[in-house]
Each structure stands twice: as C-alpha cells, then as structure tokens.
Amino acid sequence: MEDREYKAIIEAILFTMGESVELEKIANTIELDKNKTKKLIQEMQDELNQSTRGVTIMELDGSYQMCTKTEMYEYLIKIAKQPKKRVLTDVLLETLSIIAYKQPVTRVEVEKIRGVSSDHAISKLVEYNLVCELGRLDAPGRPLLFGTTEEFLRSFGVHSVDELPVLSPVQVEEFKQEAEAEMKVDLGI
C-alpha cells in the first residue's frame, strides 16, 4: 500500500472517531509500526497546515485528533447561531393541533385522541418551543399538562388561541367518519 492510501485511512479514522486516538491504535489498525505511522501523521499535519483547509490534526499526549483550525471558529459560531429549520411533519401537526385545541392536556389524553404513542411528537414540539409543560394535573400519578407557547402564536400568526379556527359540527363529523374509515382500512375490515 502507498503512503497516500495509509494517509486516507488515518484521515478516515480521525474524522470518524471525533476524539483523540492513540498512536498505537492507529498503527495497529493500519498494520504499520509506530514510527512510520507517526511520520505519516506528521506529513498530514504539515499538508493540512500549509494549505487553505479548515481542519488540522492535533497531537494530544501521544494521541491524535482531527479538529477545526482556530481561525475558523468565528464561522462555526455564526453557523451555530443560525436558527434551525423546523420540519413539522403530519404527525407533529396533528399532535400540535390536539394540544392547541384541548390545552391544558396530558400526554395520555393526546394519545387517546390520536390512538398511538405521542411521546416523540410531544418531545419534538417541546424542543421546537411550540409546546411547553404547564404544570401537573391534580390526579393519581400527577401527569404533566401541555399547552402552546408564545412561539406557537408567532409561528402561526395568531395573537391568542382564541383566534384559532373553530370547527363546525359538520366538519367534526366528517373528520370522525374519515378517521373511522381509515381505521377500517388499517384493520382490513
């Protein structure tokens, strides 16, 4: 195997591990002695430091780690501060709708309406700051109560949950029939 192939393997190891890797482990993995492995890593360090690359290889007490060059930190901070795009799937929208219209509501009540576990959906909505814990229900087990946040109102362009569209009894009945028809299809009836 050529030096460039060994370097590619070392680069892959350091990139994938994400933390420092002992020289001996690297040498054993690529089946070279420690001196030759260290020489290859030093060449890699020189190559990375002489080029306009954003990463380098640091030596940390006999171990090596691939990391970002310090002159790149300001850009990493900028990207980290940019808001993440939230993706509201049908499941999240359904769960959010139930919470918005039924608040304060427990996870069990949401699951009873949806018919499936809602732990993940509620956790995601809390993470997105669209839903928050409002307290605990005064009942056995003291389940958490969930409701919408100010971020929810901003995101959906309403000043209050009172401004949410009101469903007519006809629409509610249509949704109920659609849900029952879906259940029959799912159950094969």
Image: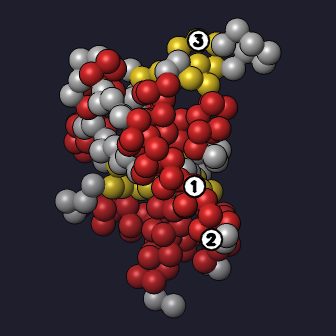
Badge 3 element: strand
Place of residue 185 in the rendered image (x, y in percent of width and height, measured from the top left) = 59, 68
At 58% from the left and 12% from the top, the residue drawn is 135
Badge 1 element: helix
At 41% from the left and 35% from the top, the residue drawn is 169
Place of residue 86 in the rendered image (x, y in percent of width and height, measured from the top left) = 34, 43
Badge 2 element: helix
Pointers 3 and 2 in contact (C-beta within 8 Å): no
Residue 156 vertical placement versus 144 (above, below): below
Please name which of the two marks, 2 or 1, marks the residue nearer to the observer.
1
Residue at the spot of label 3? 135
Q: Quadrant of the C terminus?
A: bottom right
Which sits earlier in the primary sequence, circle 3 or circle 1?
3
At 43% from the left and 63% from the top, the residue drawn is 42
Disc 3 to disc 1, C-alpha distance: 33 Å
Figure quadrant of residue 82: top left
**Amino acid found under the numbered disc labelled 3:** Gly
Label 3 Cα crowd, 10 Å radius (few <14 / some 14-19 / many 20+): some
> Which numbered disc covers residue 180?
1
Place of residue 164 in the rendered image (x, y in percent of width and height, measured from the top left) = 30, 27
Residue at the spot of label 2? 27
Please name which of the two marks, 3 or 2, marks the residue nearer to the observer.
3
Label 1 Cα crowd, 10 Å radius (few <14 / some 14-19 / many 20+): few
- Which of 16 and 168 lies nearest the eye of the viewer? 168
Left or right of 144 in this view: 15: left
